[in-house]
């Protein structure tokens, strides 16, 4: 793969004027560049965004946790691109201003899989990845991703390593049993997942999601009682529709890493 155009970085600060005067320069917070990659056996291309963050700064995973900025990728201006997918490496848990945040610190490589519409033509990625970088303040940043992917490319050990650092199965982290419960709430439905799992770290957070759901959701604080770890998500719905238990995905995140389980029983 040839990288014919280097990355561009555009930024937007949404801060009060007094805070803007004290805000650090973005060049002091992070460095970003694109890494070239390769064409896969299935005809897709792999590239990556390489970020280096200053000490005490983080950026967010695909889900930020209790608070933060949800990353979004806009590739609408690209050419010969059917789909672009970020292959998120395993995140860590951070406590910022008393809230559980899921993300990355120091250095992170985010692999991006590009699927061409026409496999015989180059892919021209003209995209914007909108992320948040946070310490005592949060700054929304738009990263312009511009590459042309063509040819066979070459292996990149940093990208390959990031692709292997995925969340592990919760059973390999000691999950022995679990159950889900759904209770009505005046704002919708509360979905709770209780897991029999040993402590995963000094701080723990359970993210309960329902794949395919379009209902607005709010993640609630995690609780531990002995060997039982419980996470809650409030789905805001007026219809009172049911919960598909097979679509429930539970992620347990700590400062040491992330484990994941699909479904509301060990056999799911």
Image (cartoon, rainbow, N blue to C red):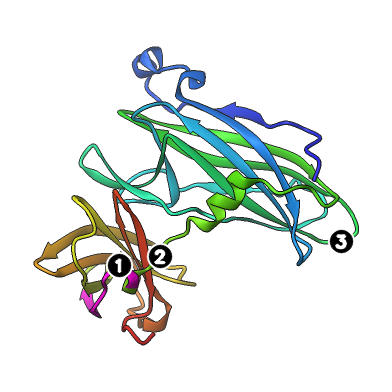
Picture quadrant where residue 144 is located: top right
Query: Residue 218, percent across and down?
Result: 31, 59
Residue 102 on the magenta segment: no
Q: From the image, tell me which residue sits under label 3.
A: 118
Give the spatial CA distance, label 2 vs label 3. Answer: 34 Å
Q: Nearer the viewer, residue 46 or 121?
A: 46
Q: Measure how far apart labels 2 and 1 are at the Cα level.
A: 8 Å
Q: Which is nearer the N-term, disc 2 or disc 1?
A: 2
Q: Which residue is mark 2?
A: 168
SS under mark 3: loop
Depth order, front residue of 237/25: 25
The residue at which mark 1 appears reads as 173
Towards the viewer: 62 or 18 = 62
Residue name at image x 23 percent, y 78 percent: 176
167, 262: nearer the viewer: 167
Q: Quadrant of residue 115?
A: bottom right
Prevalent SS, magenta region? strand
Q: Earlier in the sequence, mark 2 or mark 3?
A: 3
């Amino acid at each position: 793969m040839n990288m014919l155009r280097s990355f561009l970085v555009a930024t937007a600060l949404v801060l009060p004027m007094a805070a803007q005067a004290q805000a650090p320069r973005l060049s002091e917070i992070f460095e970003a560049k694109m890494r070239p990659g390769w064409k896969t056996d299935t005809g897709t291309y792999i590239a990556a965004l390489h970020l280096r963050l200053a000490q005490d700064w983080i950026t967010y995973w695909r889900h930020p946790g209790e608070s933060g900025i949800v990353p979004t990728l806009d590739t609408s201006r690209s050419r010969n691109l059917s789909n672009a997918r970020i292959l998120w490496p395993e995140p860590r848990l951070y406590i910022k201003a008393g809230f559980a945040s899921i993300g990355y610190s120091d250095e992170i490589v985010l692999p991006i899989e590009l699927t061409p519409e026409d496999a015989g033509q180059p892919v021209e990625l003209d995209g914007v990845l909108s992320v948040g970088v946070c310490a005592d303040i949060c700054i929304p940043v738009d990263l312009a991703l511009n590459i042309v992917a063509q040819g066979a490319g070459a292996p990149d050990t940093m990208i390959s390593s990031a692709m292997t650092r995925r969340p592990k199965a919760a059973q390999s982290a000691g999950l022995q049993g679990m159950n889900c419960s759904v209770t009505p709430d005046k704002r919708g439905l509360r979905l709770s997942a209780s897991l029999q799992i040993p402590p995963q770290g000094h701080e723990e957070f359970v993210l309960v999601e329902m794949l395919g759901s379009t209902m607005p959701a709010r993640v609630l604080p995690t609780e531990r009682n002995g060997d039982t770890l419980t996470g809650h998500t409030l789905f805001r719905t007026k219809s009172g529709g049911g919960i598909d238990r097979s679509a429930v995905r539970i992620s347990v995140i700590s400062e040491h890493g992330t484990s994941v389980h699909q479904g509301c029983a060990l056999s799911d």
